[in-house]
Amino acid sequence: MKRWLAIIPLALFGVLVVVAWQQLTKDDPAPASFTSPERPVPSTEYQTLDGTTTSLTAMKGKPYIVNFWATWCTPCKAEHPFLIQMASEGVDIVGVLHKDKNEPAKELLARDGNPFSTILLDPLGDLSLEVGISGVPESFLVNADGQIIKTIRGPIVDRSRAEDFVRAYRAELAKASAPPAGG
């Protein structure tokens, strides 16, 4: 009888391992692209890749996309051509260089093209924490009021995903350009 009692903890551990494995390997039911709880962008100023300082709130008055990326990030490299395409279609993309060095970023952008209107430096990940990213790459659509309204977790690596974000950006641009209601 005591032998069976000794096996119970081992069996429970085995069940726990199986359940954990299933939870970790199943498809994520949350969409990679979703409407975010509306929240303001941080107002903290950061240095830019070109040596000036600015904040995400300084761009208030027009919509833009914030893209967190790094040169050491393989999915970021796969996403890069789609960002170039989006920028060529008039989308304003602000890059945030996440925990990376300036020189490799400058080399990559010179070689592969620069889709960013501005690049904020985030060497310690402080801005990433303020915005609440889960990892790089991650992109946010910010409306003209400086509110994050849409998020894409992970890389934008297919045309339909990029087109969805471009459509949402253009809708926000149209709202920002529309005359005020009632006047």
Image (spheres, helix red, strand yellow):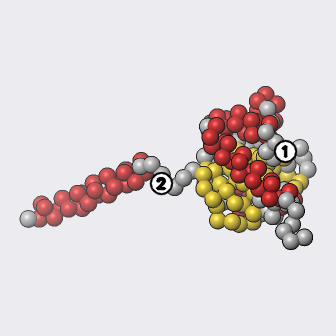
Residue 13, percent from left and from top = 29, 57
Task: Between residue 8 and residue 90, name the one nearer to us.
Answer: 90
Task: Between residue 83 and residue 15, name the one nearer to us.
Answer: 83
| First along the sequence among labels 1 and 2 | 2
Badge 1 amino acid? Ser
Residue visible at 45% across and 48% down?
A: 27
Task: Between residue 147 and residue 23, name the one nearer to us.
Answer: 147
Residue that numbered label 2 is attached to: 29
Give residue 129's quadrant in the image.
bottom right
Question: Taking 28 as reference, is 112 above or below it?
Answer: above
Give residue 177's quadrant in the image.
bottom right
Task: Between residue 134 and residue 151, name the one nearer to us.
Answer: 151
Callout in the foreground (1, 2): 2
Q: Quadrant of the N terminus?
A: bottom left
Residue 140, percent from left and from top = 70, 53
Residue 34, percent from left and from top = 60, 56
Considering every residue shown, the one lying at the far left of the view is 1
Question: Taking 76 as reference, is 152 above or below it?
Answer: below
Residue that numbered label 1 is attached to: 117
Considering every residue shown, the one lying at the far top of the view is 111
Q: Secondary structure at mark 2?
A: loop
